[in-house]
Image (cartoon, rainbow, N blue to C red):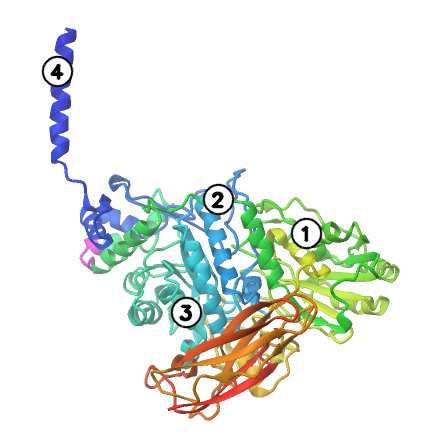
Amino acid sequence: MLKKFVFLSLITLTYTASIAQNITTPTYLDETKPVEQRVQDALSRMTLEEKVAMLHAQSKFSSAGVPRLGIPEFWTTDGPHGVRAEVKWDEWDQAGWTNDSIVAFPALTALAATWNKKMSWNYGKALGEEARYRKKDILLGPGINIYRTPLNGRNFEYMGEDPYLTSKMAVPYIQGVQSNGVATSVKHFAFNNQEMFRHTSNVKVDDRAMYEIYLPAFKAAVTEGDSWTIMGAYDKYKDQYSSQNQYLLNDILKGEWNYKGVVISDWGAVNNTEQAIKNGLDLEFGSWTNGLSAGTKNAYDNYYLAQPYLNLIKSGKVGTKELDDKVSRLLNLAYKTTMNKNKPFGSIASEEHKTVAKQVGEEGIVLLKNDKNILPIDLNKVKTIAVIGENAIKMMTVGGGSSSLKAKYEILPLDGIKSRFAKEAEVKFARGYVGDPRGEYNGVKSGQDLKDDRPADVLLNEAVDLAKKSDFVIFVGGLNKSDHQDAEGADRKSYGLPYNQDNLIAALTKANKNFAVVLVSGNAVAMPWVKDVPAIVQAWYLGSEAGHSLASVLSGDTNPSGKLPFTFPVKLEDNAAHRLGEYPGNKEELAAGKGKNQENPINISYNEGIFVGYRWHDTQKIKPQFSFGHGLSYTTFAFGKAKSDKTTMTQDDKITFTFTVKNTGRKAGAEVAQLYIADLKSSVPRPSKELKGFEKVFLNPGEEKEVSITIDKTALSFFDADKHSWVAEPGDFEALIGNASDNIQTKVKFTLQ
């Protein structure tokens, strides 16, 4: 019996082996074949139902693969400055995992303020490693919408007001993230420049402003950064919602820019099946559909690109051309992410990531004002330090919307200051004001309970008394990530500081002249006390290493080198969108109640056109509180006279400007050399100058370096809407070089033939 069993087993093995030799490995699994051929093979093997299933979510943050063919599902995650905590499959509630805590990196305003392209790549690489370790395939960031108004609650997630700076900082971020086999999803394409009415607005912007201000960073992200996905916005443009928009997605993105990647909807941004099919959307997430009322088991089956799409195909009302294009894009994405066997394993909360977070924070902090050089704090003279303000003790990694994080740790400003100064000086704290004492957002609990029921005058008097008894006072205030401040879903209600901080600051200026105000925010704020405060520091939201980064700058261990990525106007009316444009929408329509639902969207006209930020202030000679590109140092720098390699350039030529930057002080530091271009005579209105180049230069005391910046005619061009093309008009131009938009140090004239 045993012999018979062995004999039959041998026959079976031989037969199986002979069959196996005749089986051809599917091309889509054969890594020796070109990806395009593999995609077509996989596409040919998929059923209609499998194709449609790939186009929409299957949970809050995942979409389906094709299990039968071994094609994995996609997992997405927020956000731009840290990997979001896990939520339940069908709900926004926390999943309750114990291994989803991460390093929180500084918000993108802080990254942009470094003006350091290499730092942006380091940031992206570290963030991508954390996403990869958490098995995420698509990171929902970076946010690159233009800073149009200081009231936008989501400005802290973006990179400022200038399309050139945003482009140059976004591209290395994207490349760093994607080096881990994790796709970025640049967002929100396009015109998500305010949170109020974001679901119910129709943006009216002229073509010139669109191409010169609001689209360049997106174009750079996909044509230079090769972002594998891009996210549509909520708002309407030309009466079509951005996530299903013929003009933005088909004509411009996939047409003019020849984009081959995947277009993802923002969560809940889709509302029409036929438009979603035809107008460029590839992957639908977050649609608010109710599966039970529609009689199905799964709400995701009712997404616009789900069963409704399948029904249209089966009824013959639409074909499968768009379907195959969408699935092909998703399969191409899979070969770069989920089916990429060469991607690294990633890492989380590593020492390298903590270092990156700290360095970005240090380089991003902007020293706005420093009268009599009272900073850095001189410990030969200072033995008692008063730290005042709620933001010194409030966690800022939690809150703000979808970018809220479950950080492994967060060094608070007070803790960072104590850690750095306590051995040499006594550090005491007073609350000063009560803002938002809560410590929970969207199910993530910070563990803090900052409740304090004492009256405001008691808190103020306590702070003033401490200030009078101290050698140095550090006020840490600003905004926070509560609703109507720096937070998704709502805009700020006013330009001023909340929680009566202005009165507290005014009282502290009288109590002690050795006084520094530290603003924690992602937005500009009004400063009625600016002339009375000797030192002002813009500290942003600095993530896990916030306290260490801040203390390093206050102590002088780090020489501040951050520069503002947007203008601080003196008052809100100095901002062009508020002076000329419509915010938050058309006044007559506001009065009529429009914007309350998608059936009655409100129009928002960008009447200021191209004159956004410093382009408006500089051209109209409106003095800002602090200018675009502004940022002081603990040392001094001198610019040598700039020269060009030619005085006349042709349309196909390039021109290089060369100049020196010298550290004329006693401390090592970094300066950002900024090159602006002015068109001295134009047939159309143009800003007085526009940023077209920058380099960050690190110098020891007395050291001098030569800097060269090369431009071509694209730096001289404007968008001609009538011709629908970029035009560089022959004539005289001027290169303006300095360290802020309002501090030009040297100029060079040249002519374009």
Q: Amino acid at mark 2?
A: Ser
Residue hosting label 3: 236
Q: Residue at x 25, y 50 (%)?
A: 51
| Closer to us: 596 or 198 | 198
| Closer to us: 641 or 441 | 641
| Sequence-wise first label, 4 or 2 | 4
| Closer to us: 319 or 163 | 163
In the rendered image, the vertical position of residue 253 relative to residue 56, given as above or below? below
Say few, some or many: other residues with alpha carbon within 10 Å of mark 1 (under 14 / 14 to 19 / 20 or more).
many
Residue 347: which disc? 2
- Whether residues under marks 1 and 3 lie with C-beta atoms below 8 angstroms apart, the answer is no
Residue hosting label 4: 8
Magenta stretch in the rendered image: 313-320
Quarter the N terminus occupies? top left
Find numbered disc 3 in the image and state the secondary structure of the residue it sits on. Answer: strand
Q: Amino acid at mark 4?
A: Leu
Residue 641 image-quadrant placement: bottom right
Q: Which mark is nearer the camera, 1 or 3? A: 1
Q: CA distance from mark 4 to mark 1?
A: 73 Å
| Sequence-wise first label, 4 or 1 | 4
Q: CA distance from mark 2 to mark 1?
A: 24 Å
Q: Residue at x 67, y 74 (%)?
A: 664
